[in-house]
Amino acid sequence: MTTMNKTDVEYTIPEVTPELERGPVWLRDQRRASREAFNVAEVPPRGLHLWRYTDPKTFLYDRDAVADTAYSENYDIVEKIELDNLKNGNIAALATDLGGRDIKLNGADELAKQGVVLSSLSSAVEHHHELVENYLYRLVNARTGKFEAMNGALWNDGIFVYVPDGVTVDKPIHLLRESGLARSSQFPRLLVVVGKNAELTLIDEYGGGSLDENEGISHANGAVEIFGLEDSRTRYVMLQRQASAMKLYLTHRAQIERGASMLTVPLAFGALLSKENFGVTLNGEGADSNMYGLLFGSGYQHFDNHTLHHHAADNTSSNIDFKVVLKDRSHSAYTGLIRIDNDARTCQAYQENRNLLLNEGVRADTIPELEILNEDVQCSHGATIGPMDPESVFYLEARGIERDEAIRMIVSGFVDHTLKTVPDDLRQRIGTFVAQRLERI
């Protein structure tokens, strides 16, 4: 396989590409529009706003790469854990997505008795075409950005979830997205529609990827679109635990209507380089959105995260609490934007980003942003970057606790609030990720 010199060669999606011919006419038109937008759009200049800390050319990779048919051994272990959770009634269903190409469903038939649809996106295009055509590409499309256009053109298959009006899915639906090994590329896509006065908890877990940078990098470019209709209640938990030679670009967008609530919990532990964008538009009066993020970096990991709350209606409320823990030589860049429209009155919005640095040599950058177009609001934002409080460590040491254990206790307390928002079936595994990193302090 040839390697593209991204600094010298213009990267374009060829007109003759198999993915562009998938689906009915309307879908092929959307794919081609995305291809054209990608080919026409310039690569964002390095240093321009959201690209201050990450080189966009990193996400331009060889189109000859394809998703592997081989996956890491860890995938089988995690799938077995979640199948056991399904059997024991801890989750409502399990959908596995191998490289954005092979979708496996467990528990979908039982959900169907409530009218809930859990299917591959390709099947939904055929059997639920009116729903899919109405919502797909509305939030993440050719106009969102160059890399979103790339996904819009090249996604092969994805997952579709629909909860009818008035239906509550009591247990979480778990999505397990596995990337291929070295030199693979994948374009996972997710579309979720939660009906009026309906309720859903969704766990979206991303794993796999290349294990050795010397053997070759693996890439993923993902898109998530979630619609919460009037008075709906949606919880979305995203777990990113990808392998150490993986590069991920992910765009998540949600839109919630009057009286709806949305909880978004981004959890980032893996990948060599990841750029993740989480955004919610509060599109109806009384809508409420909360984000509780947690990032734990080690080694030479590089994380670039952006959050957005867009208040487009009166009397809406939002809150962001994004925590970062860094050790070794890891780097986190966080940018958070609160936007309140001119005609969105009596809104409340809060944003906080706290960064805990466990040793010298790590780096954290934080840029909280406000774009408030009227005065009838209550808003605040804040950010902190600093090492562990030496007085807190001394306090615990003075009571006979070893220094390393004291540090672990302080970090555990720092992340505890976020972990409490995670569904029970996932909380133990998340706790394991945190514990593994604390053991190496």
Image: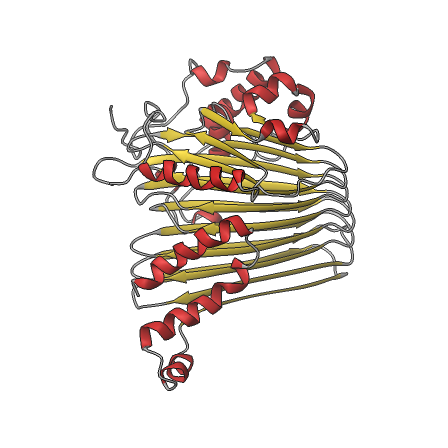
Residue 355 placed where, x, y %?
45, 64
Residue 168 placed where, x, y %?
71, 41
Residue 72 placed where, x, y %?
32, 36
Question: From this viewpoint, is residue 136 visible?
Answer: no
Q: Is residue 205 left or right of residue 260?
A: left
Image height of 309 relative to 126, above or below = below
Image height of 363 relative to 48, above or below = below
Q: Is residue 232 left or right of residue 323?
A: right
Q: Residue at x 43, y 15 (%)?
A: 18
Question: From this viewpoint, is residue 167 visible?
Answer: yes
Which residue ends up furthest to the bottom in the rendered image?
Answer: 398
Q: Residue at x 42, y 71 (%)?
A: 409
Which residue ends up furthest to the front in the rendered image?
Answer: 88
Q: Residue at x 44, y 24 (%)?
A: 101
Quarter of the image that includes the N terminus: top left
Q: Is residue 346 left or right of residue 239?
A: right
> Which is more toward the observer, 233 or 216?
233
Image height of 244 relative to 8, above or below = below
- Rendering quarter of residue 392: bottom left
- Rendering quarter of residue 57: top left
Residue 347 placed where, x, y %?
74, 57
